């Protein structure tokens, strides 16, 4: 089941897409409920609503619209709070960045967490502002994003799946020169438009743990990154359980799980983004997120 936020007649709506790319308005499927945002849906979601949605999508008289006739937005356009990110969570990415960020890198013994600010997340087809007046080293990073489904703290590894709503694709755009200059990552990863996400959120019911999903990125059609989520150094149960120790995770929280090798800075010479570049981030069973650099 693929949940989306979309524009229809200049109005932002929450919906779901079936296998035939028909879009169903969530408020039509869940008659008597009114969800203006994905955040509201996630906060009030339960198994009963899931079954009602599935049933409604199968009924012949349920209104729908073609995916071609709507504009997709980021599934969660305005995040609840800063995105929680993991750095250095694929071994091959650690190796490729061993010198480019200013010091030797080693495989981490514990997760490397950082925050990524985003006042508004860019959706499919949205433009990335390269901020040429601030940075000259803009890079891409395909990542699996976890969407938290219910409030939880001190979550046990074996109970993690109960706290997940679903999964999406995120492109963690990064200003490498700012990242190196400030010796930490928040500044270089938080410029406006530096978070893109989509095209949808796939419900956990479709993607049960453990996940083994192929992920890749292309720039102007050239394959740059290719790996599988089974190669995560710290897997999803570990990440959520560890993060929740003393920190309350909330519905709608976004956790980006890290990127594999093949980022622009990892090449010799570097293959950094420039105006006009088209980036395609793909994860099997979720879809493809495409954005262009202004």
Image (cartoon, helix red, strand yellow):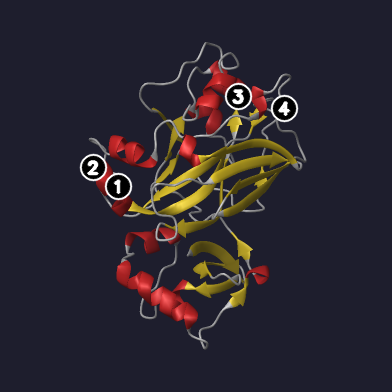
Q: Which residue is mark 4?
A: 271
x then y, percent, for residue 202: 48, 58
Tell whether label 1 touches label 2 (CB within 8 Å): yes
Q: Which mark is residue 160?
A: 1
Q: Residue at x 30, y 45 (%)?
A: 249
Neighbourhood count class around disc 1 (C-alpha, 10 Å): few under 14, some 14–19, many 20 upward = some
For the residues marked 3 and 1, what is the alpha-carbon distance in whole angstroms?
33 Å
Q: Which residue is mark 3?
A: 176
Residue at the spot of label 2: 156
Q: Earlier in the sequence, mark 3 or mark 1?
A: 1
User: Of label 3 and label 4, which has the lower sequence position?
Assistant: 3
**Badge 2: residue crowd in 10 Å (few <14, some 14–19, many ≥20):** some
| Circle 2 SS class | loop
The residue at the far top in this view is 103
Q: How many marks?
A: 4
At horizontal 57% and vertical 35% (from top left) the residue drawn is 191
In this rendering, which labeled residue sits more in front, label 2 or label 4? 2
Q: Secondary structure at mark 1?
A: helix
Question: In the picture provided, is 165 more to the left or to the right than 69?
Answer: left
């Amino acid at each position: 089941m693929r949940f989306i936020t979309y524009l229809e007649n200049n109005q932002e709506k929450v919906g779901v897409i079936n296998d035939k790319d028909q879009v169903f308005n969530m408020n039509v499927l869940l008659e008597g409920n009114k969800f203006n945002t994905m955040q509201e849906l996630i906060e009030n979601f339960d198994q009963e609503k899931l079954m009602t949605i599935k049933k409604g999508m199968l009924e012949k008289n349920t209104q729908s619209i073609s995916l071609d006739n709507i504009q997709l937005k980021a599934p969660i356009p305005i995040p609840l709070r800063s995105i929680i990110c993991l750095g250095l969570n694929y071994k091959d990415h650690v190796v490729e960045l061993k010198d480019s960020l200013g010091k030797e890198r080693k495989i981490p013994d514990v997760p490397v967490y950082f925050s990524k600010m985003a006042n508004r997340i860019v959706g499919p087809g949205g433009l990335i502002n390269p901020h040429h007046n601030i940075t000259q080293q803009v890079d891409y990073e395909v990542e699996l994003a976890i969407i938290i489904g219910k409030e939880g703290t001190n979550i046990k590894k074996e109970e993690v799946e109960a706290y997940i709503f679903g999964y999406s694709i995120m492109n963690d755009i990064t200003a490498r020169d700012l990242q190196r200059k400030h010796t930490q990552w928040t500044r270089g990863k938080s410029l406006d438009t530096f978070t893109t996400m989509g095209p949808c959120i796939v419900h956990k019911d479709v993607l049960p743990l453990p996940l083994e999903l192929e992920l890749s990125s292309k720039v102007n059609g050239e394959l740059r990154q290719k790996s599988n989520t089974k190669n995560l150094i710290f897997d999803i149960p570990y990440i959520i359980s560890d993060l929740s120790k003393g920190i309350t995770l909330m519905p709608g929280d976004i956790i980006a799980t890290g990127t594999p090798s093949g980022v622009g800075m990892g090449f010799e010479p570097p293959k950094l983004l420039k105006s006009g570049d088209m980036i395609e981030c793909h994860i099997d069973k979720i879809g493809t997120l495409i954005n262009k650099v202004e």
